Image (cartoon, rainbow, N blue to C red):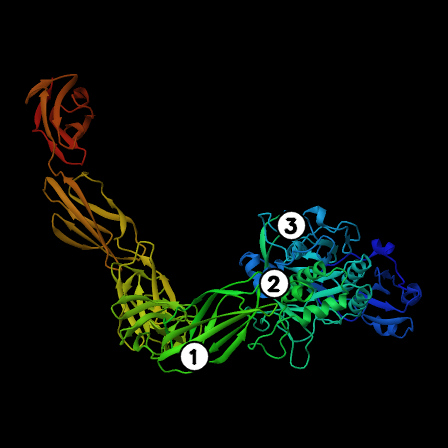
Amino acid sequence: MRVVSFSLVAVLLAGLTATPAAAADTPQRLVIGLVPGADATAVVGPLGIEAVPVPGLDAVTVTAPATAIATLLKDPAVRYAEIDPLVAADATADPDGATSRAQGTVNQIPGAWTWTIGDPSVTVAVVDSGVTANEDLSPDRLDPGYDFADGDADPADDDGHGTLIATTIAARHGNGVGGMGVCGQCRIMPVRVLKHRAGGPAEGYASTVAAGIAWAAEQKAPIINLSLSTAKRSSVLEDAVAAATADGALVVASAGDDNSVQPYYPAAFEPTLAVGSSGGQFGGALNASNRNSEKNRWVDVGAWRSYRALDTQSTLRFISGTSASAALVSGIAALGLAMRPGLPAADLRSAIVDTAGRADTMEPEDAPIVDAAALIHSLGGADDRAPAITGLNPANLALVSGHSFRLTPGISDDHAIKRSELEIDGVVARRDHVWQGGFTVTPPRGEEGLLSYTLRVYDYAGRSAEATRTVRFDAIEPDGRLDAPAQDTPVQTGGRVKVVFTATTADTAKVTAEGVVLKQTGPKQWSGEIKPANEGIYVDVYDVAGNVLSLYRGVVFDDQRPDIAIESPRDGQHVRGAVDVRMTQTVREELRSLTVDGVPAKKIGAWTWQARVVPKAHGYVSAVSEDLAGNMTSAGVRLVVDNAGPVATVNPAQNKRLRGTFTTSVTGVRDASGVAKAELWANGKYLGTGYSKKVATGKLNGTVKLVWKLTDKLGNSRTYTRNVIADNKAPTVSITKAPKNRAKVKGTVKVYVSAKDASGVARVELIVNGKVVAKDVKAGYVLSANTKKQKKTMKVRVRAYDKLGNVTYTSVRTWYRK
């Protein structure tokens, strides 16, 4: 008897977060198998740890270092002690794919539906991430389940994987939504053992999965689906499979998707029905699927790996992987139970394996592919009507390739076709299933002529139908040449190459390069661009009969970018106008192009290039190189673009009036590249260099044109022009009212003066006996002299100054004091 009853389920450890492999002394989750009736507390108590029962099994889990395993195994009450491995879901939701019916054709599921689409009396337990009802799987079709991941009675799906599996198995038929479940009238028992994991598949501990398996068996689920696996052999999982088998359940488990021949669990535990993924047309195992090796044939059957189903939000998805394969087989097993109620699990398992099909294209170790129609027929499905061949292409006397041609039959049957035979010239050339309605025929001889073939098809009752055709075949290949690409043309990985083919025969019908159809661009020419997958391009040329000429042209993958260094000008250099940019290739290879700011560069040496460009105002100059493969790189320098002369302030100001010799200067002179010289011209006469110069006007009266030319170190110049007015003419002055010459005067005498000047009169002065006795600065000049303070004889005259300092005098008058 089992030491733990289901009433202890609520205490099952619920933490399922995936962790990296722990060190031996780091506490981690261990699972301990006990002999029936053993006291778990007595086993783990001496270690100071607490045991958590695994519901339904003689096992407990503990948290302890892995080093405790050796101690535990010494206890006679312990059957095994090991790290509790993580188990992961074996599929992902794929948004692409064909319809459910088309995907199920590989395993003859639509053929099985002609007999049964299931029965509500059949329940499939889905031990997974839980199940949530949706539009294709209504709540009334779900049996009460349990959540072993969280320890409660609500097995709702937090990941989506379990719902996709359940809907693949039992989605309703004919409701116009989602897909068509394999067993469209069966029921689902949800058992949650996995938790959602961000960035990866849902996960759970092996002990949690084992508890779910044991519980589902205790609830009398006849079929238990396990679309999950682990690479680590787990004794607790083995116990669960054994317990479920003893309870009469058929355990169906996915083989995993790690492209491995090593056993994965629980699929590899007998008598689990281990399911791998198979290719179409009765091919072998797909590379993504785990599979059998020559020495270890642990995978029992294969099934298609993709199916359309609704997720928890009733959104259409395509579940892909061995998870889907296992779900298909669980659904097929449920159809078998609907056909034969009460069939023992061992007999159902044997019937599934025994009716699975094989083909000549399969390796001996490949697991046979489940045939749902064959299973249902073997369990009592009647097949009363013979098949019929309703059409056969190519038509009679059609022209076909002498190497191979596609045979496409039209076939009808009340259920499904089990197998077919192709006979060519009286010899059976192949035997196969007609899953997709067509296959390739290769004639036994290569010459031209007539060929007769007969197609026979057989239903599951052994009845047959046949049709014979005669075709004309042509074995002569077309001919022509590859004009492009050249041999060893460099190309980037993932880059495109132009392919050009020219035909020399008139019957060319199609040209492909790496499977891409080229366009006809001339009477006998085809061209196009392709992405080479390898360092070579295969070109196939087909004639109207389908004969093919295969050509090959090697290419060289080159993902190394070319590299160039700008030798001159240097970064930060001041430049003006057009600049010669000189570059050197640091990676020595042939270039397709080299441009500088869009200007093509010229090769001036083995690995040296030059281009003349006018830098933009921002100063950045970019050189872009491209090699023959299309790899590109760039190099740049940041220059200081200076196309303007120095700036300065010129003195004197415009139209300033001056006299005699004056000084002109430039101040605040500045330029980013530095000033080379300053030059001065006055009325066209060159006066030399310097920042300050004297200009003599002599007796000139009029405009003096000053021209300063400032030149920077790059040769940029700026000219400043100033017009000043030379005024060397004295003002006019006259006495308008005053005692006349030789007049006798007394007291204070007033002298009235008129004075004018273009630059303005600064002042007028009254001079008596050589001394200034009065002055006035305002027009209407009036000067006064106190004659009492002067000598008896007075020499009197007036002088006037303009504002530049020019001076003039009146004639002298003699006055006598009375």
Position in image of residue 24 (x %, y %)? 78, 71
Horizontal side of 31 relative to 799 (left or right) equals: right
Horizontal side of 760 relative to 402 (left or right) equals: left
Horizontal side of 379 relative to 247 (left or right) equals: left
How far is disc 2 from disc 3 in space, using C-alphas? 42 Å
How far is disc 3 from disc 1 in space, using C-alphas? 52 Å
Q: Residue at x 48, y 77 (%)?
A: 423
Of circles 3 and 1, the one toward us is 1
Kindly identify the amino acid type of the residue bearing the numbered disc 1. Pro
Kindly identify the amino acid type of the residue bearing the numbered disc 2. Asp
Element under label 1? loop
Residue underneath mark 1:
443
- Residue 104 visible in the current orientation: yes
Quarter of the picture containing the N terminus is bottom right
Position in image of residue 669 (x %, y %)? 29, 51
Element under label 3? loop
Position in image of residue 629 (x %, y %)? 37, 71
Where 704 sits versus 675, above or below?
above
Quarter of the picture containing the C terminus is top left
Residue underneath mark 2:
384
Q: Residues within 10 Å of mark 3 (few under 14, many from 20)?
A: many
Residue underneath mark 3:
312
Sequence-wise first label, 2 or 3: 3
Q: Residue at x 31, y 68 (%)?
A: 527
